[in-house]
Amino acid sequence: MEVELSYLALVRAALERGGPVIPVRAVIREKVRLRDGSDRQTPLAFEFRREPERSPSRLRMDVRTGQLFLRSCTTGSAERSEGHEYDSGYPAYGWNSEVTRRAEAVSAAGLGHGLVYQLRDLHSVREDDVERERRGAVAAMDGWFVCDKALWKAVPEPLFHVYRTNEGWKTALSFDHSGSRAGSARVGSDRRHFHFALSQYEEMVEWKDRLCEMTGRRGTVDEFRAHQVYEPRLDGYHFDLRFALDDIAYRYRRFVEFPGGGGTAADLFSLPMPVFDVLAEVRRLHAVPIGDYDEAICGQIAELIGRIEDVVAEFPEFAPVFAKPTENRLQVEKWNARPISLLTAPVLPAPR
C-alpha cells in the first residue's frame, strides 16, 4: 500500500538561484510503498491495556520470520503528521535521525547549512543525491507494514516492566532492553524495577499484588490477552538477576573512581575479604552470558545477592557499592516467588 510520508534527505543544492551548491537538509514528501499485512500473514499476537489507557497496545507477528510488530498509528494520522523528525512512532523517524546526525557532522566541519528546507524550494539540486537518499529512506522503512488501516513497526520482544511511582505500582511494556536494561531501569539508581516475559503475565500480577501488600501501595489493574501465535523467548527472572550484577559492577566502578563519595579502596585486592569475595563472585557470574542462564546460575546469583546485607552490616563503609537492603531483599524474594517445577533446583532460604 502506498502511504504519503515525509522524510529528510541530505542533498547538495543552492539556497537561491545562482547561489553556491552546499549540503543541506531537505524534506521530501511523497508516496512510499509499504508492504501489506493480513490476519493470515501477520496475525494478532498480543494485546495489553494498561490502566488508565483506553486503547490497548497491540502486537502482530510475521508468521514467516517470527518478527513482532507494534501498532503505531493509523495511516491517516501518519499522512497528516508534521512531526516526522520527533515522533518515534513515525515510519521515517529512524532514517530522519540518521540524516540529522550526518548533517550535523557536515555543519560542524563548516561545509553545510544547519537549517531544514523543503526540497521544492531549493535550486540546482543534485538528483543523484535525492535518489541515494530516497533509496536509503525506503530501505529504512522496510520494517513497517500496513494492516487494518494502521501502520505497524518491527520491535524486539517486549517485557512487562513493573515499577513504582507516587501513585503506586504500575506495569508497562518495555521494548528498550538492550543488554540487561529495560525502560527506566538504570544501573546506579533504584533497583525496584521488575520484569516478566509475555509468558509470565500471571506471575507478574501475583508479584505486583505482593509488592502492593508489602509496601502499602495500590497497583494498577491491567488487561492482557495472548492469541497463542508467538512463543516468548525472554525470561524476566533472568533479566532482573543480570541487572543486579550490572548494578553492583557499576556501583563498584563509581566507588573506586570517585572516592570523595565515600570510597576507600582503589584496588580490588585491597578490600576486606568478605567484600572481595562478593565482588569476585559478581565478576565470575557476570561473565556468564544471559542466554546461558539456568536454574543453577540464577540460584547462585540470588544467593550472592542474599549475602550482601550481612556484608554491608559488617563493613558499612562499603554500602555505596551495593543497593539498599530492601532492594536486595526484593530481588531475592522475587526469585523465590517464581513457580517451581519438579525439575528445578531447590528454593533458596527466604531473605531475612
Image (cartoon, rainbow, N blue to C red):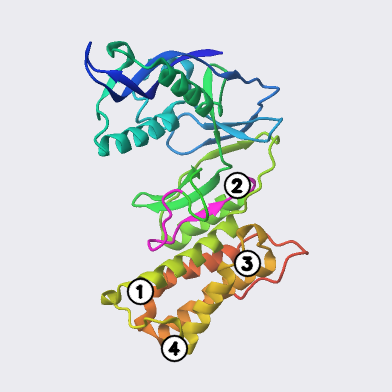
Q: Which numbered disc, 3 or 4, marks the residue that appears first in the sequence?
A: 4
Using the numbered discs, state the Cα–Cα distance from disc 1 to disc 3 in whole angstroms: 26 Å
Quarter assignment of residue 333:
bottom right
**What residue type is disc 3 on?**
Cys
Residue designated by label 2: 201
Q: Residue at x 42, y 87 (%)?
A: 270
At label 2, counting other C-alpha atoms closer than 10 Å, the crowd grade (few under 14, some 14-19, many 20 or more) is: some
Tell me whether the residue at label 3 lies in contact with that at label 2, contact meaning CB atoms closer than 8 angstroms: no
Q: Is residue 67 left or right of residue 96?
A: right
Mark toward the viewer: 1 or 3:
1
Query: Could you say whether the residue bearing mark 3 is in a helix, strand or loop?
Result: helix
Q: Is residue 65 above or below residue 346?
A: above
Give x and y (percent) for residue 93. Answer: 42, 30
Using the numbered discs, state the Cα–Cα distance from disc 2 to disc 4 in whole angstroms: 42 Å
Residue designated by label 1: 255
Using the numbered discs, state the Cα–Cα distance from disc 1 to disc 2 in whole angstroms: 37 Å
Give x and y (percent) for residue 123. Answer: 28, 12
Using the numbered discs, state the Cα–Cα distance from disc 3 to disc 2 in whole angstroms: 20 Å
Give the magenta-colored segment's residue range.
183-199
Q: Main secondary structure of the magenta part?
A: loop
- Residue 81 in sight here: yes
Q: Quadrant of the N terminus?
A: top right
Q: Is residue 315 above or below residue 82?
A: below
Residue designated by label 4: 272
For this rendering, which residue is in front, 165 or 96? 96
Q: Which numbered disc, 1 or 2, marks the residue that appears first in the sequence?
A: 2
Quarter assignment of residue 154:
top right
**What residue type is disc 1 on?**
Phe
Query: Could you say whether the residue bearing mark 1 is in a helix, strand or loop?
Result: helix
